Amino acid sequence: MRVLLSLAKLYPLLLVAIAWELAARAGLVRPIFLPPVSTVIAALPALFWSGDILAPLGTSLYRAALGLAVAMIVGIGLGFLMARVRWIKWLLDPLVSLAFPSPKVAFLPIFVLWFGIDHLSKIALVAITCVFPFIIAAEAGARTVSRTQLWAAETMGTSRSGLVFRIILPGSLPSLMSGVRIAVPFALVSAFTAEMIAGGGGLGGDLIYAQRFFETTTVFALLLVMLVTGYLADALVLGLRRRVLRWHEG
Amino acid sequence: MPATDPNIVISDVSKRFERRGQTFTALEHVDMQVAQGEFVSIVGPSGCGKSTLLYMLGGFVAPSGGQLSAGGKPVTGPGIDRGVVFQEYALFPWLSVADNIGYALVRKGLPRAEQAAIVARYVDLMGLRGFETAYPRELSGGMKQRVALARTFAYDPGILLLDEPFGALDAQTREIMQDELLRLWRSNRKTVVMVTHDVDEAVYLSNRVCVMSHRPGRIVEEFPIDLDHSASREDVVVSATYRDQRNAVWLAVRRQVTRASGGAAA
């Protein structure tokens, strides 16, 4: 029943699909520019079984996940330091303010120059895109941990590293999970974008490749895979958030 | 009755703060001794630095001058020998009630069975049965302070430092919690230093009440309190002894508040 209800909420998608199908079928546009949605969906199983979806998807997810992991470790570390150490806050604040709103993809040519055309340059782009949401979320989160909570922990025999891992980290989780929710789509988008610009496989690379050969159906099919991937990743994050924040209101 | 060896010694302690290039003195020439097993309260006008003094005993704030020692050792930082209860509870909201109470027991590395037994004992003592798996946000203010007290009593520190422990509670809950604290203290006779702005609370609970002056804070008057707590709360509070001692402390605090407001009331 709940599944049916949540599916019912997706009806706007159905409306878009119907409009798309009708526009294509009525011959308003040539199929080479817009194939009918039914054709695109029909093409998916063949692409799936030939490995033309799973292989590039795996490549893209690998790059996104690794970059995300680097961003998470570095970002949480820097954010905590900014919340607790005044001179680090003083040092990093202007850098974060400058770099966070900058077009990170503009760094890609430099990363390709430094790290080559394969995985590393893409992972670097994902990492630099996602590090800022983590820095900001970690700093804000660490500030929600009160002075008296830290003092209480200290009187009860918590070591210095214990303060970070047992008090500041769990206390920051509500804020950090909001950071994760922003960073995960950022990671996917920057991995796909890097692949589209610099090539080197992955869903983004394959999509551009298909476009060059006017395989428009494949372009749309890969686009659908990207959309579903993003949707599922976000659903996963929301599920994770519910699990780890049961103690927290909202 | 308390033994004679001092458990806490504060000698000539001062504290100065810098704010916007200005120095102001929060505490000056504070001298105080607390005997083993004694319950001492510090009262005074707000802003007199009484909480700062407690934070120095806790080892969270360093004095600008003078020395503090607890249990014969100079205070250099927070330590497991001094348990602290804060007005705002300072619970860990991501831990259940039972895990909050057991927090220090895990840090101490006690065997699991022993941890569970101690937690269960304080859950019972503090009337928290049935709430072991609840999270702090699901509790009322009074319940949260019960957890905070249980958490501190559970690991058995020799000295208790209470910073306005019932300040955030409503009047009825506050009285109930005061009696809980009194009951716990009478059963284990820890050394207690409590900071409060509530004169009735200080007199009702303590062996001795110290009155601090307005900034720079000093201890200006001390009142030994002698109440018979084997009687009920009602009998104690309506007794002439309580009334006289309470009035004496209240007048002393009143003198400090009047002086602080520039003698406007005089």
Image (cartoon, coloured by chain):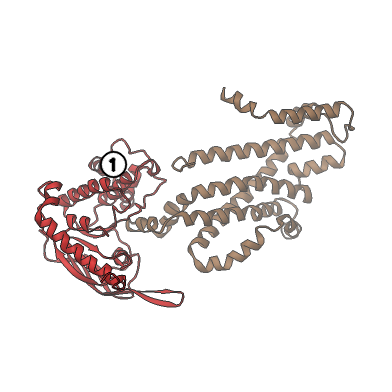
Chain colours: A brown, B red
Left or right placement of residue B10 versus residue A129 in this view: left
Q: Residue at x 65, y 37 (%)?
A: A231
Query: Looking at the rendering, in which quadrant would you find the N terminus of chain B?
Result: bottom left
Q: Please rate how many residues cluster around mark 1, counting C-alpha atoms within 10 Å: few if below 14, some from 14 to 19, many from 20.
A: some
Quarter location, residue B13: bottom left
Q: What chain does badge 1 belong to?
A: B
Left or right placement of residue A125 versus residue A221 in this view: left
Q: Amino acid at mark 1?
A: Ala
Left or right placement of residue B26 versus residue A119 in this view: left
Which residue reaches farthest top?
A1
> Where residue B248 sits: x, y (%)?
16, 63
Q: Secondary structure at mark 1?
A: helix
Left or right placement of residue B134 versus residue B115 in this view: right
> Where residue A233 sits: x, y (%)?
62, 39
- The residue to which callout 1 is attached is B116
Answer above or below: position of B74 versus B156.
below
Most foreground residue, A123 or A72: A72
> Where residue B213 sits: x, y (%)?
26, 71
Most foreground residue, A202 or A230: A230
> Where residue A173 sits: x, y (%)?
49, 48
Answer above or below: position of A219 versus B195.
above
Query: Looking at the rendering, in which quadrant would you find the C terminus of chain B?
Result: bottom left
Q: How many numbered marks have been drawn onto this rendered protein structure?
A: 1
Asked if one can make out residue A122 in the rendered structure from this viewpoint, the answer is yes
Most foreground residue, B152 or B207: B207
Most foreground residue, B45 or A118: B45
Asked if one can make out residue B37 in the rendered structure from this viewpoint, the answer is no
